[in-house]
Image (spheres, rainbow, N blue to C red):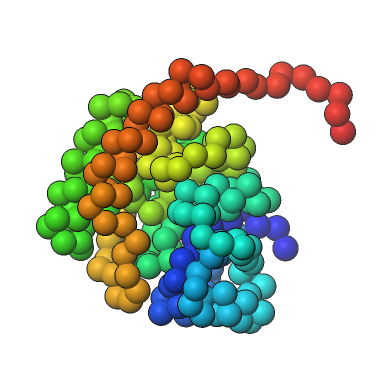
Amino acid sequence: MSYHLTVVVPVYNEEDNLLRVEEEFLSFFKIASAKSKVLFVNDGSQDRSQELIEEICIRNTDFEYISFVENYGLSAAIKAGFDHTDTTLVGYIDSDLQTSPEDFNILLAHIAGYDLVTGVRADRKDSFVKNMSSKIANGIRRSFTHDGMDDTGCPLKIIKTEYAQRIPMFRGLHRFLPAMILLQKGKVLQVPVRHFPRIAGQAKFGLWNRLLGPLMDCFAYLWMKKKYINYRIGKSNRG
């Protein structure tokens, strides 16, 4: 069975959401404009997440998983998902389902002309504090990266795998995916997608993560940008 899109779903203590993830993706698979599968990345969950992931994968051949030996964080989970992708396209969505798998079709409609297409959460269903801290963090990031993105925290993205797998590993990676594609001379696009309130589980990021953490990551990004090596192979005799 030939897949074109692998959707990476990081999981950390999301036992209350995983059956909804299964249900939503089973619906999406029926209407997906590209043959798709899910790759769960269990980031050292301490609840029943791993047990549920394995049950889902047994029931459905379009679901796969890898599991960390301990908690390494969201950026590590995303990077591991990218590295273990074997399709031409790789997507990313959070397991809290505040964005919908169905909206991958919106991104897929544009990916042919771009190397990364990211969602922008329209009519966000988060608290005032969360919305404001996100806007401030995005403004800080844009001033450092000049990536032109309004909402890099939106957990709905599709990237051409060859670009995703060249992204170096660092904490805070999830905030700089468009900027890292631009460093590779790739093309990026943002399009509006739907946003929903969290139904179950708990948010993993607080005020520190959304404001001070991103500011520190921006300085790391500037260092990386200065040292970044970008190359393309023009010819090879390898098989």
Quadrant the N terminus occupies: bottom right
Name the residue at 35% across, 28% down. 219
Position of residue 175 measured from the top left corner of the image (x, y, whole percent):
38, 42
Q: Is 87 displayed left or right of 183 in the figure? A: right
Q: Is 141 displayed left or right of 125 in the figure? A: right
Quadrant the C terminus occupies: top right
Position of residue 93 measured from the top left corner of the image (x, y, whole percent):
44, 58
Quadrant in which residue 220 is drawn: top left
Q: Is 160 displayed left or right of 178 in the figure? A: right
Q: Is residue 124 placed above or below 173 in the rendered structure?
A: below
Name the residue at 67% across, 73% down. 61
Name the residue at 43% across, 49% down. 157
Q: Nearer the viewer, residue 183 or 188?
A: 183
Position of residue 208 measured from the top left corner of the image (x, y, whole percent):
26, 49
Q: Nearer the viewer, residue 145 or 70?
A: 70
In the displayed image of the protein, which residue is found farthest to the left?
128
Residue 120 in view here: no
Q: Is residue 233 placed above or below 74 in the rendered structure?
A: above
Quadrant in which residue 56 is drawn: bottom right
Residue 17 in view here: yes
Q: How many marks?
A: 0
Name the residue at 23% across, 52% down. 207
Q: Is residue 30 placed above or below 99 in the rendered structure?
A: below
Position of residue 132 measured from the top left corner of the image (x, y, whole percent):
15, 49
